[in-house]
Amino acid sequence: MSGADASGNHLRSDVRGEAAPAEDAAAEDTPAGIFPGEGAMAKDAPAGDLPTGGALAGNTSAEGAPAGGAPAQSTSAGDAPAEGAPAGGAPAPGALAESAAAAQLLRTAARELSEIGVAIQEASVHATAALTDGTVLGALPYAPAEGYRAQRALLRVVTDRRGLGYAVAGGRLGALAARLGGMAGAESLAVLVLATSLRLRITAVALDHPELVDDPLLARLIGAVGADRDIESVRALRALLRDRGAVRTLSELAPVFGEVLALRALLDENPLNDTAAWLIATGKGYASADPIIGMSNRAVAVLDTGEGGARRLEPAPAEVTRLSSEGSLLGFLRNIGALGTTGRVLIQSVAGPDGVVRHVVQAPGMRSGRPDNGSPQDLLGAFSSAVLDSGPYSRALIKAVDDFGIPPGGEIALVGHSAGGAAIMNLAQDPEFCARYTVTHAVAVGSPVDFKKPADPRTWIASVTNQHDIIPTLDGQGAGGCFDLHPGWYVVDYSDPTHLFPICHSIERYTANLAHDLPEARDRIDRQLTPYRGPVTRSQAYLLSDRDPHPEGFPFLTVPTYPAATSRGTLELPVRCQDGSALTAYFAADPGVAAALLEGTGLGPAVQIAGRALVAVHAFWNRRTSLGGYREVHLGIVVHDPWRPRPFRVWPDLVRRADRRRSGSFLVGSVVDTDTVSAVAPEIWGCEPSVVPLDVAVTARSARVVVGGPDSRLLAFRGPLGPGIPAGAWDLVGYSRREGATLRSCVETRGRGRAHPAPRARLTVGQAAHPMARHLRELGLDGARPLLCLSTVAHQTLRAAAVPMRIT
């Protein structure tokens, strides 16, 4: 950390991992394409690649270093006061060294007490087994006096407070007796020893985070939990939440979050969370349940199901400009920030300094929204990635990598943030994946990965975590950890003044810390990533899903297609719209004008309601179709079955599917907003639309349809649609005339629609000479309100070519 931040506070860090050569030149001379740790960068190189003062103060350890647990945290040196230090100058180096030494001693003692607690528990299991051994019990009649004394002594050992406490353990009966004893408040010596170990871990963290003891509300809560005072703990937590709110409370407790929860779980009367507390206190594995109520983590994680799917997706132009064109740690992290939590990942190919093309997988964190939203980056996906060795996220990543076309044995670096870090570590520990590809590096930022283990021991691992970030502590190991779980990893565990979660968890904050506050850590990782530092030659984004997605439009749009020759070339029919919206507004119009417009068509009469002709305005916004995106508006006179007009049966017929409907709209005017559709429409559907500016917007509550520009307005229909009745989307049957023949065309629709029986929107007609505007004025619809509106906010449509009909 180079100096202080704007507030005068320094970052604190704990840096540990395999040692590196003292000079950068050694890293530069490393043969490209080999694993870090081979050749010039051997893991048994002498320690000391990071300075112990100046910009980044911290301890480093290498595999094979003397025992003593994880290196102590240390405070950065500089000209500004460290966090918690009196204003007016930096604390003396001796004070910093004394604090670091004290924290190291506390962690060492905590680790030793944890080992003692495990040994006591093992002794309890053996004593319980001897006490309940059937062979021993069967021999009692042969030596009753000696057997009674031995059994009595064993019973005192596992039940007396002067022995191992209430320490019945082992086997089904022992586990049941232990749970019953825990519910009754009985405690074993092993539990008390582990509780002391956790208290020492909390005290060690408090040396680097004095706010934990200086803040009276925090100190009150931690003290109440440590003293096993349940009522006082609840009161202290309520006071803290009332004063700070949930987010700030979690943020301030983050450095000791796991230790406080484990301590509470060890000392309470709930037997369901004991296993999780033991795992956190002993560092033996990922917490198998939440330490509050004991709900199984795996039971939740297995709800995240799916084989994983990946589909190529092109980023938006604005996002493309933000993607890094050079390979580097900060470049990869900024790429993750550019993608955001949108369910996407990025794979890039980079030409290294030796000219060899290698590949980098970049995986963002959890996607916001529902806990299970079909994306492996949802809450359930984040949970399963952290808890399980494989989940939909990692399986989807594998499919993306396979699709990208990396050759067998190709070298890959994995970079992930939050849940993405856990997912890329699952890739690194997948033997089959590592057999197909060569995973050389894995960098996890803000991720719970302490209990992940790469399948290839040569894979170089880096983990970067902020001590106020809750997410990395979800595996049970946080700033208070006293176990060096991965001596060969490069671990940066730091704290900066941005204590508020989730800000301190964001990829932008981690990137800024590495860019400005952790230069040595950044340079150390970049040195290891030297083979991946060079120009980016290819980038491909993928949208991930829990399962392989259906083909777009499946099943409705999955239909046979055929070519149709037009003046604009060959088109594929039917025209398929993957996403669109529509509005149909029915009006009561002048019946005489309607009859005149139908004269000579063979269609008619017009459908009437209360002596007035029924006229419809159909508006579509076809956002994505096989013809491209376009808008269209049609004016139609609603007509009966051309052969058998039935005034009473027409109403149910109007809501039938298009393939069964006889009635329809005779289109007397059509407009579109693209030249292509205007050119092919007469050849395919018979209508002859003109090209004018169009605006079509439909929501569940209102609509806006504007035809024509400001100086040549044909019509405008806008306003609230009123209450809506849910219904299916409505098909459209249109009749048109071409070269003296009558044609029938259908628009088949799938989606959710609404019927609005009392719309309050109003139609206004302009004074333009366009036929559509003239017909509307003649029909008397200027200023009219519709009788009924049918709206569809999102739908899919199929539109085949019109079919000629012989009407006699």
Image (tube, grey):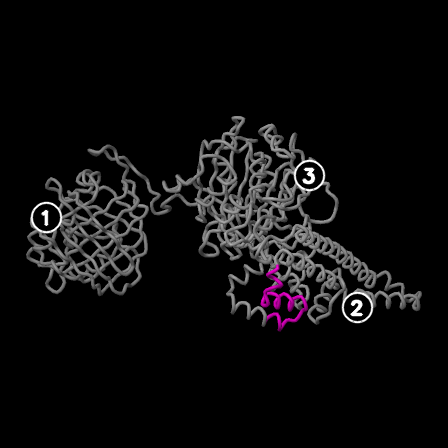
N-terminal of the pair, mark 1 or mark 2, is 2
Binning the other alpha carbons within 10 Å of mark 3 as few (below 14), some (14 to 19) or many (20 upward) gives some
Magenta range: 210-234
Q: Is residue 113 above or below residue 22?
A: below
Disc 3 and disc 2: Cα gap in Å? 49 Å
What is the x, y in percent for residue 745? Answer: 21, 46
Of labels 3 and 1, earlier in sequence is 3
On residue 47, which mark appears? 3
Task: Name the mark nearer the viewer: 1 or 2.
Answer: 2
Residue under the point 63% across and 33% down = 23
Q: Main secondary structure of the magenta part?
A: helix
Label 2 is placed on what type of residue? Answer: Thr
Residue lying farthest top?
A: 355
Does residue 260 appear left or right of residue 771 in this picture?
right
Q: Which residue position is annotated with label 1?
A: 771
Residue 426: x and y in percent read 58, 44
Cα gap from disc 3 to disc 1, whole angstroms: 86 Å
Of the image marks 3 and 2, the number of the one nearer the N terminus: 3
Residue 462 screen position, x and y as percent: 59, 42
Q: Is residue 15 above or below residue 639?
A: above
